[in-house]
Image: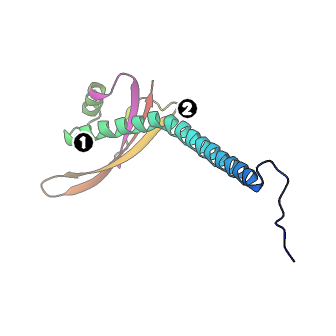
């Protein structure tokens, strides 16, 4: 008894059907990858300005710390130095703890505000004390 191979009566046989299924599967995979890339790029591009804002605030606090301005714990000195180095398009508020010194403007509710914290030590001849600054920075 001879077994006859079952085949659909297609023009190119079963090969064309398998090729079509492969092409559809590949198309679905490519479209999925493109959608994922688009969503990732769209989400990342909206977070970059916020990250830049945070880095600017951290840089300002770092400058105030390294030139010794924050360690003076004098509101007028810190405020005048902050006004010199703060870029025109930004506004900022700084609080120094545990002294509860507040420098800068009121934090707005209607826009993105980046915040951060930086620790520092003030050493005198015989003692040292731990402090930290909390800062908030936003675009004007």
The percent position of residue 36, horizontal first and vertical second, equals 59, 45
Range of the magenta residues? 85-98
Q: Residue furthest front?
A: 1
Comparing 17 with 87, the one in front is: 17
- On the image, numbered disc 1 is attached to which residue? 65
Q: Position of residue 33 (x, y in %)?
A: 59, 46
Residue that carries the numbered disc 2 in the rendered image: 109
Instruction: Place residue 52 in its image quadrant.
Output: top left
Left of 10 or right of it: where is 82?
left
Q: Quadrant of residue 71?
A: top left
Mark 2, secondary structure of its residue: loop
From this view, report whether residue 94 is shown above or below residue 5: above
Residue at left offset 26%, top offset 25%:
84
Q: Residue at x 84, y 64 (%)?
A: 6
Q: Residue at x 66, y 45 (%)?
A: 27
Mark 2 Cα shell of 10 Å, populated few (<14), some (14-19), many (≥20):
few
Is residue 111 in view from this perspective? yes
Q: Nearer the viewer, residue 81 or 76?
A: 81
- In the depicted view, which residue is nearer to us: 27 or 83? 27
């Amino acid at each position: 008894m001879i077994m006859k191979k079952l085949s659909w009566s297609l023009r190119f046989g079963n090969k064309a059907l398998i090729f079509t299924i492969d092409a559809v599967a590949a198309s679905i995979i490519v479209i999925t990858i493109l959608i994922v890339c688009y969503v990732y790029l769209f989400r990342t591009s909206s977070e970059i300005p916020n990250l830049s804002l945070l880095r600017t605030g951290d840089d300002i606090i770092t400058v105030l710390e390294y030139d010794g301005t924050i360690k003076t714990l004098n509101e007028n000195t810190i405020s005048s130095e902050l006004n010199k180095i703060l870029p025109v398009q930004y506004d900022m508020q700084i609080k120094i703890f545990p002294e509860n010194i507040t420098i800068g403007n009121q934090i707005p509710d209607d826009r993105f505000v980046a915040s951060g914290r930086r620790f520092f030590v003030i050493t005198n001849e015989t003692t040292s004390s731990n402090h930290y600054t909390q800062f908030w920075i936003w675009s004007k």
